[in-house]
Image (cartoon, helix red, strand yellow):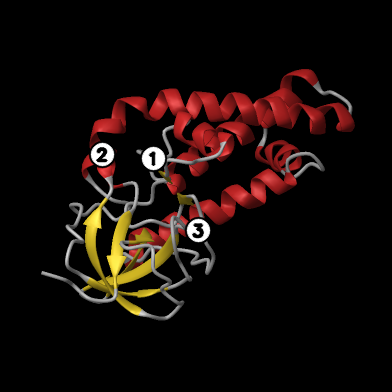
Amino acid sequence: MTFKEFLTIAFSPVNTVLSVLLILSVIYWLFTIVTGLDIDVGIDADFDADINSPDGHVHVSDDASAWIHFLKFLNFDIVPITYFLTLSLLLTWLGSLYAEVFFSFEVWISALLVIPIFIISILLTKLILKPLNPFFREINHKGEVSYDFLGRQGRMKSTIHGDKIGILEVFIGSDPMTLMVKSKDGEIIEHGTTVYVVDEAVGRKYYYVAKEIKF
């Protein structure tokens, strides 16, 4: 296969989106390596799972939905999502690319094949990354040792009360991190309120916060 033929297949109607996403992923990782910065997307809402957590994992709450349990099945509570999605995208792109090279299906058939290829890629990614799970358990998405958040002060990014789970932003030095939190006494804590982390749930699925530390 010549380089011209490779480009033709890589940017065919079926593979163009995958190729562009893969290029953006490469740019993201190059930016991360060169600058040492990571790009997080903060969402001001209440969730049962923490995707933008300090360790880059999905934290599953006690009343998690079937979808969240599926994410846990894929080890998103251990493996940083950026690693998982990048490898899944690469495998999907390779599968779609070779499907066109060796089989030359009609465009609509090739487009439909992307779905099962993506599903297979997700399962393969889980198997490939499984040996690294002990490593990912010990570090967060920036390669740092996990922090102890008890007693730290933070600012609420959502309103919580009762058993409702919300988002708390804390700073470790100049580095902002987000935690999934519940109100310690069930009282209403409004968005923007400064609170303290006073306790943590088993397995650190979420933390408990209060407006002040009581001794």
Going by the numbered disc 1, the residue's amino acid type is Asp
| Placement of 164 over or under 102, stated as above or below | below
Provide residue 205's location: percent of width, then percent of height: 34, 46
The residue mark sitting in front, 1 or 3, is 1
Q: Quadrant of the C terminus?
A: bottom left
Separation (CA) of disc 2 from disc 3: 26 Å
Question: Which residue was labeled with disc 2?
Answer: 137
Q: Is residue 1 visible?
A: no
Q: Secondary structure at mark 3?
A: helix
**Disc 2 to disc 1, C-alpha distance:** 9 Å
Where, by quadrant of the figure, is residue 109 drawn? top right
**Does label 2 or label 3 sit earlier along the sequence?**
3
| Location of residue 52 in the rendering, given as x and y in whole percent from the top left corner | 44, 57
Asked which quadrant contains residue 180, the reply is bottom left
Sequence order check: which comes first, mark 1 or mark 3?
A: 3
Numbered label attached to residue 27: 3
- Element type at mark 1: loop
Q: Residues within 10 Å of mark 2 (few under 14, many from 20)?
A: some
**In the rendered structure, are the residues bearing label 2 and label 3 in contact, judged by CB atoms less than 8 Å apart?**
no
On screen, residue 139 above or below 44: above
Residue 77 image label? 1
Q: Toward the viewer: 35 or 195?
A: 195
